Structures are given as structure tokens and as C-alpha cells.
Image (cartoon, grey):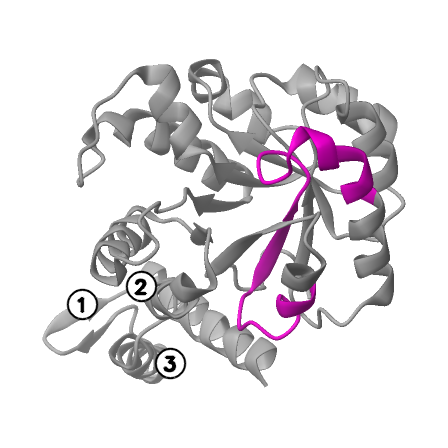
Amino acid sequence: MDTRSRPFRSVLYIPGSKSRALEKAKVLPVDAVIFDLEDAVSVSEKEAARETLAQALAAGGYGARMRIVRINGLDTQWGKDDAKAAAQMGCDAILLPKVSDPADLDALAEITGDVPLWAMMETPRGMLNAAAIAAHPKLQGMVMGTNDLAKELQTRFRADRLPMMAGLGLCLLAAKAEGLVIVDGVYNAFKDAEGLAVECSQGRDMGFDGKTLIHPAQVDVANTAFAPSAEEIDLASRQIVAFDKAEAAGQGVAVVDGKIVENLHVATAREIIAKADAIAAVSA
């Protein structure tokens, strides 16, 4: 499935060092997995985690789930070896942390060759260079690292994420301009389903493709929030039918539920139907 046509409602971080978690990910209803060699792996386990993860990916069983490997930064003692190992793991993409400018991706691509790249967007400089980063020829997706961004910005926590809006908006604009996937940052209170639902709704309204998650308990909330609702699918279907009839009659617009339907509305409607179909395909 093409990257842009596949769903990314739920993107779950899994420690690359934990065999049980790697096995469990095979049966979770997630759209993508970030196999983490960075923050989720202790210093003492860094090297062993590469082999553990390589064995898990070689064994397969992840179905239609997108397999993304997050390596350590190339400025660390583990990054280059992570990159070399990940390039041989048969993963779908390699995720580089703290991308601040396109040169960071150039350095990774020199090691990983043709493997698609994703970028963690989590530094002020990364926000300011988002457009240039998004235009990198090897980049397919962006992941918001809101915890690190909050630390760098020295923000106070707000449920509405107002201090994050400038950075989130810059990255969204950059990703959409280049046709990239972009997923929202994590929600730390993994037992707070209501709070997660609110933040997912905000992210969906903004235009994110999905949410990164830190616990399996968060998956259902994200899957629901970032999937077209039954009402949205019904409206989209009726808009397409009405516009097709209007066009056949030589008219340029249709009316559905008292509102004008033009070409741009039909394009959005078709995207909604396509997303629903893609979700059904990966859920089968």
C-alpha cells in the first residue's frame, strides 16, 4: 500500500529491547509501530536491542502495520551503528530523532541508502526549518516530538497546547505542502482516555494523520478519533452522488443538506471514502 493511501491513525512506540512487547505488537490493532532504539532503551541495552529487534523483524508477523525503526541520533555513540543495522532489517522506514535541518537527513541517507526516512520534529530549529526538512527527497513522514519540544521551549503544560501551536502549525504546513504523512505527539497520561480523546480530536481538527502512542490502552481512542465517522462517510457519499448527478445535467454545483457542493468538496469527500476503505482493508 502506498504511504499516502494507508492509514496512520495509531502509531505505537515499542521498545526494541523488549521481546514480549515486540511479539504483542503483532496482534494490536495499530496502523504503525515505531520500534524504538532511542528513548525507550537503556544505555546498557542499546547494542543488544539492535539484535533483538532485527530478529523480531526477520521473523515477521506484523501484517499491514507500517514498521518504522527509530534510531539514536547520529551524534551519539550508537547512532551510526543503529543506522547501519536498521538499513538491513527490512523495515519500512527509519526515523531520525531531533532533526533540525536537511543536512541531518543527508547524513543518515549516506548510511541507509534507499530506505525511506522519517523525521522527529522536536527542536525549535527543526520547527523553523520544517519546510526545508519536508522537502528532502528521502523523507516520507514527520513525527511530532512534543515532550522534547516542550522542554526546549520551556513551556508550561496547558491542555489546549497553546504554547505548541506555532511549532505544530509550521510542521503541518510543511508536511502538507510536500504530501508527507504527519503524526501528532504522544499523550503522556496513558490512563486518561478522556483527555487523550480531547487531544486526538484537536489533532484531527488540525489535520494530523494520526497520533503517536505510548501504551496499548490508547489505541482504540486514537483509531476512533482519526477514522472518518459514520456521519462523515454518509455525507461524503451523498455529496459524490449529488455532484455526479449535477455534472451529468450540465451543472457545476450541487446542493446537499442545504449547502453548496463544488469540486473541492467532492475531492475531500473522495478522500474520506478512500480513507475509510483503506482502514477497512488493514482491519480485515
Which residue corresponds to mark 2? 265
**Amino acid carrying mark 2 in the image:** His
Asked if labels 2 and 1 touch by Cβ distance under 8 angstroms, the answer is: yes
Q: Which comes before the other along the chain, label 3 or label 1?
A: 3
Closer to the observer: label 1 or label 2? 2
Specify the quadrant of the image occupied by residue 24.
bottom right
**Mark number displayed over residue 237:** none
Which residue corresponds to mark 3? 244
Question: What residue range appears in magenta?
Answer: 23-50
In the image, what residue occupies the spot 22% across and 54% down?
A: 195
- State the image coordinates of residue 72 (x, y, percent, origin top left): 68, 29
Specify the quadrant of the image occupied by residue 73.
top right
Using the image, determine if residue 209 lies above or below residue 280.
above
86 displayed left or right of 13: right
Specify few, some or many for label 1: CA neighbours under 10 Å numbering under 14, 14-19, or 20 or more.
few
Instruction: Report, in whole angstroms, how far the alpha carbon at label 1 lies from the one at label 2.
Output: 9 Å
Closer to the observer: label 2 or label 3? 2
Which residue corresponds to mark 1? 260
Instruction: Report, in whole angstroms, how far the alpha carbon at label 3 lies from the one at label 1.
Output: 14 Å
**Amino acid carrying mark 3 in the image:** Asp
Q: Is residue 24 located in the magenta-colored stretch of the structure?
A: yes
